[in-house]
């Protein structure tokens, strides 16, 4: 449960006192405005009342509000927003702003949600429920300091609010304060032992601490509680609790090496009803993880066709001395001293589109640099689609037990309908065929890596062009198949990225531009990246700033690298 409902104070006697309504009021009125009414009955009753055209103004706004509540129970947030907007037109109210803001939150539109919660708070009086919900939206944006401040206000207004303690704990966990997070979530469990959600949040902390047994125990109890009793708060997105619990238990089982139980949990996730953004992201992750585990069962791992190497001579740096748990940088550095893995692919020997001479050279250089700073690297050069998928899937299975994962790709890359794809060397665009079936979807890689306790760094030295125009075969010496709209900036960095160490995606060039292949042995971007990625004590975003400056200078402003980040605190690929 992440949202709370603010019910407006209404006088039923006044609401149902209108003439010509006596026959229906005893049946439709209570069905429409009772929060325990099943969603379909509530929507039907409210719709019939609206059709009677008996009410106007504030009373009609109330009916639209309650119909929005019914839609909310069903997880139909577009209809929630439509009815709440009509209610606000008729009579603005804090409860309606809160409801609409919560719907925007569940759609993942956090800035709009915050604006609605701000309006609700301005209308007053200040409400702990609205502070709690605005805190959720700030947490969704990754603004954990503001989220914690709002949860503080919610707890001050309602000291027995288990959900506010839980969500404040989740925000502290995101900032690296695992002990503070655990204290808050334990208090949530104490306040209401029947709630499954705090147990799910606590399981994430146990897994971050390496206590897999406790993570499995907490998620198992959360699943038992969720099945025994449906969420009592009507603002809980349908199916979200079980989806979250099964996802977290599946990840814990996978970290334990128990593939059989992990597959059962991921299958359960996919059977759930996902209406909110978080549940949809969990299902995307479960789909990829389940496919990877099934694939491993069907075809036991063999030596990959693509070149692969692991660093056996350069151990990871030793763990630093214990630091204060509340320091974000300390936590992310600590994660970097755990198991660190990287996937490096360079595709240049294209058969049916313009070949690129440098990506294999780029991949070798980056792979060597990452091995030198302690990464276990899976390396693939000039991969066709089958080899590319195998290399990626093998990496994603290994990444399940890592604390930091780096993905580097050099070669052709394209956008199709807002989704980014990496292009294998055997790509051939044929009339009437599904072009995307011949490529590798970046969303699959992101979903497979999405986890609340892992830091992900994805670096694409690829084109930012749309291949749909008929200029495919005549591509020039850039990493663009044809000049066009470019790769899509990611709309989301995953559900885990908003709660864990975070994700950074770096592109070799800015939106709408092409990444040059270069005139030397390496592209301008990879040449600069290989020079800086191993610099000791250089924070990753500072490293990318140096890379950007070198690329802009080398290309005389023709290429400007770009990045999108949800990283929390400082991340160091090469420690001091």
Image (spheres, grey):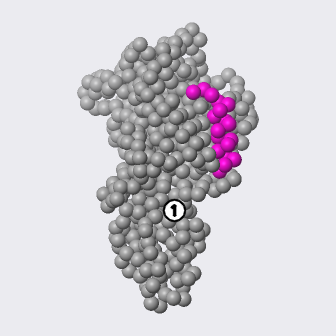
Q: Is residue 46 above or below residue 502?
A: below
* Rendering coords of residue 471 (x, y %): 41, 43
In percent of the image, x 42 and y 32: which residue is there?
A: 568
Question: Can you give x and y, in whole percent of width and height, for residue 298 in the image?
Answer: 74, 35
- The answer to whether residue 494 of the structure is visible from this angle is no
The quadrant holding residue 98 is: bottom left
Q: Which quadrant would residue 398 be assigned to in this image? A: top right
185 or 477: nearer the eye? 185
- The overriding secondary structure of the stretch rendered in magenta is helix
Up the image or down, 370 lies above or below 352; here it is above
Residue beneath the point at 56% across and 62% down: 74
In the image, residue 389 above or below residue 57: above
| Image location of residue 546, percent across then percent down | 32, 23
In the depicted view, which residue is nearer to us: 135 or 239?
135
**Mark 1 burial class by Cα count in 10 Å: few <14, some 14-19, many 20+:** many
Question: Is residue 60 placed above or below 561 in the rendered structure?
Answer: below
Q: Secondary structure at mark 1?
A: helix
| Residue 454 x, y percent position in the rendering | 52, 30
Quarter of the image where the C terminus is located: top left
Q: Is residue 220 magenta?
A: yes
Residue 219 belongs to the span the image colors magenta = yes
Segment colored magenta: 209-226
Q: How many marks?
A: 1
Task: Say which residue label 1 marks.
Answer: 72
Q: Left or right: 244 with respect to 559?
A: right
Q: Give me the residue at 63% from left, 34% from top.
A: 215
Left or right: 219 in relation to 71? right
Task: Name the residue rendered at 38%, 42% in the picture.
Answer: 149
206 to the left or right of 486:
right
Q: Does the image show residue 272? A: yes
């Amino acid at each position: 449960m992440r949202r709370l409902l603010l019910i407006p104070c209404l006088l039923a006697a006044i609401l149902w006192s209108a003439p010509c309504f006596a026959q229906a009021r005893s049946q439709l009125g209570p069905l429409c405005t009772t929060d325990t009414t099943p969603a379909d009955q509530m929507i039907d009753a409210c719709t019939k009342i609206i059709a009677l055209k008996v009410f106007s103004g504030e009373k009609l706004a109330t009916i639209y509000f309650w119909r929005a509540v019914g839609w909310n129970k069903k997880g139909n947030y577009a209809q929630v927003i439509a009815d709440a907007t009509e209610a606000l037109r008729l009579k603005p109210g804090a409860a309606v702003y809160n409801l609409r803001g919560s719907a925007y939150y569940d759609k993942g539109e956090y800035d709009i949600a915050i604006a609605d919660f701000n309006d609700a708070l301005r209308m007053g009086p200040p409400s702990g429920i609205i502070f709690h919900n605005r805190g959720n939206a700030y947490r969704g944006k990754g603004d954990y300091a503001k989220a914690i401040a709002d949860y503080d206000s919610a707890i001050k207004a309602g000291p027995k609010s288990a959900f506010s303690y839980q969500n404040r704990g989740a925000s502290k966990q995101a900032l690296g304060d695992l002990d503070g997070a655990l204290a808050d979530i334990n208090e949530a469990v104490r306040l209401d032992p029947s709630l499954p959600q705090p147990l799910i949040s606590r399981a994430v902390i146990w897994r971050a601490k390496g206590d897999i047994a406790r993570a499995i125990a907490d998620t198992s109890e959360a699943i038992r509680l969720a099945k025994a009793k449906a969420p009592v708060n009507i603002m809980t997105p349908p199916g979200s609790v079980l989806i979250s619990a099964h996802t977290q238990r599946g990840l814990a089982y996978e970290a334990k090496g128990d593939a059989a139980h992990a597959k059962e949990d991921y299958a359960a996730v996919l059977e759930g009803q996902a209406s909110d953004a978080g549940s949809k992201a969990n299902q995307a992750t479960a789909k990829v993880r389940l496919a990877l585990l099934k694939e491993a069962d069907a075809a036991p791992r063999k030596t990959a066709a693509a070149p692969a190497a692991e660093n056996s001579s350069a151990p990871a740096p030793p763990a630093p001395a214990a630091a204060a748990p509340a320091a974000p940088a300390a936590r992310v550095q600590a994660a970097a001293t755990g198991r660190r893995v990287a996937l490096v692919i360079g595709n240049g020997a294209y058969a049916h589109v313009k070949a690129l001479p440098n990506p294999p050279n780029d991949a070798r250089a980056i792979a060597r640099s990452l091995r030198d700073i302690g990464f276990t690297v899976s390396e693939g050069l000039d991969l066709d689609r089958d080899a590319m998928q195998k290399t990626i899937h093998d990496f994603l299975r290994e990444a399940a037990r890592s604390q930091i994962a780096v993905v580097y790709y050099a070669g052709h890359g394209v956008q199709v309908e807002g989704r980014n794809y990496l292009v294998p060397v055997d790509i051939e665009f044929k009339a009437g065929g599904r072009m995307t079936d011949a490529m590798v979807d970046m969303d699959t890689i992101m979903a497979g890596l999405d986890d609340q306790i892992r830091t992900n760094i994805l670096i694409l030295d690829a084109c930012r062009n749309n291949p749909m125009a008929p200029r495919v075969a005549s591509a020039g010496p850039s990493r663009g198949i044809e000049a066009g709209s470019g790769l899509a900036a990611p709309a989301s960095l995953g559900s885990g990225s908003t709660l864990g160490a975070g994700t950074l995606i770096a592109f070799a060039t800015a939106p709408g531009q092409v990444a040059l292949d270069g005139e030397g042995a390496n592209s301008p971007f990879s040449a600069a990246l290989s020079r800086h990625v191993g610099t000791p004590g250089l924070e990753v975003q500072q490293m990318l700033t140096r890379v950007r400056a070198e690329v802009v200078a080398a290309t005389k402003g023709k290429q400007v690298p770009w990045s999108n980040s949800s990283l929390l605190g400082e991340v160091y690929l090469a420690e001091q």
